[in-house]
Structure formats: structure tokens, C-alpha cells
Image: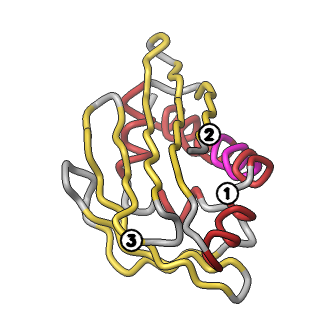
Amino acid sequence: MPIFDFTFEVPAPLHVVQEFHHSTSALKRLTPPPTLVKIHSVEPLAEGSVSRFTLWVGPLPLNWTAIHKNVSGNGFTDVQQSGPAEKWEHTHTFTELDADNTRVNEHIEYEHKKGFWGVVTRLLFSYPNLYFMFCYRRWITRRACHKAATESK
């Protein structure tokens, strides 16, 4: 089973990083171009909350339903209930480094389906593509959280 890990620091307090990730607009903001996101429904982040969306990769729609679990002040896990992969569990962990800095750990465990969707996910969820996506997410998270932290002072 493939595993992807990515860790970065954000120059913002823990509560700012939590608020950013709890926003119902976070998925849209964190998805790098050229992928487009169509949100069908997003419940506020809580234990058992559900998000339904379509990721458009060119002309290819990836319909996805995610359920959130282990939601706490230190992170959460989104689990693909239905979607392009056989399995997708993405755990976000937030660790306060000091009053003004937070570490974000991203951990994904996933499996590919057989057939067409297996080929698609092997391409889309290859290490280089995931690495690019999470570099983008790091940039957006740092930028948004730094701005929010600066504005709140």
C-alpha cells in the first residue's frame, strides 16, 4: 500500500492553522491548478461530517465523497467513502511549535483500484504529482495563515 508523507511549518499560531483547515472553503483553496473543484456539499468539519465534490482533471471528473474522523484540535482524517481510489485516508496533524509557529504533518495511505481507475490514480497520485500538490498546499497554507495571524494582531 503506497504511503505519502509531507511535513512543513507555518508561521502562524496553532489556532489560525486549525481555523484555516476547518473552513468549508479550504479544499477549493488548497487544490492546485489546473485541477478544478466543484463542491456539491460540505458539512462543517466535525466527527462524521461529509464532503462531496468533483475534482476535474482536464476532461476527467473524479467524483469523491469523504468522511471526517478523529477530528480534534490537533487535526483530523478524511477517509474516501467513494471515489477514484480503492482506499484513501489522509491524516492532517497540527503541532504547536511555539506561540507563533505550527508544524503540519500530512500522511496519506492509499490503494489503487484495478482497471481504468487504477491507471488514473497511479498517474495522478504518483509521488511527483503528490509532491507538487503538497508544495502548492504548503504555499497556500503559509500565505493564508500568515495573513490571518498578521491581521489578528
Q: Which residues are magenta?
A: 132-138
Gap between marks 2 and 3, in whole Å? 20 Å
Reading the chain from its start, which is encountered first: label 2 or label 1? Answer: 2
Disc 3 crowd, CA 10 A, few/some/many (<14, 14-19, 20+): some
- Three-letter residue code for mark 3: Ser
Residue at 58 percent across and 56 percent down: it is 30
In depth, the one of 3 and 96 nearer the eye is: 3
Give residue 4's mark. 2
Q: Position of residue 144 (x, y in %)?
A: 57, 45
Compared with residue 59, is residue 139 higher up or lower down, i.e. above or below? above
Disc 2 crowd, CA 10 A, few/some/many (<14, 14-19, 20+): some
| Quadrant of residue 76 within the rendered picture | top left
Type of secondary structure dominating the magenta stretch: helix
Q: Residue furthest bottom?
A: 59
Q: Position of residue 3 (x, y in %)?
A: 59, 39
Q: Is residue 76 left or right of residue 138?
A: left
Residue at 53 percent across and 19 percent down: it is 101
Residue at 57 percent across and 61 percent down: it is 112
Report which residue position mark 3 lands on. 82
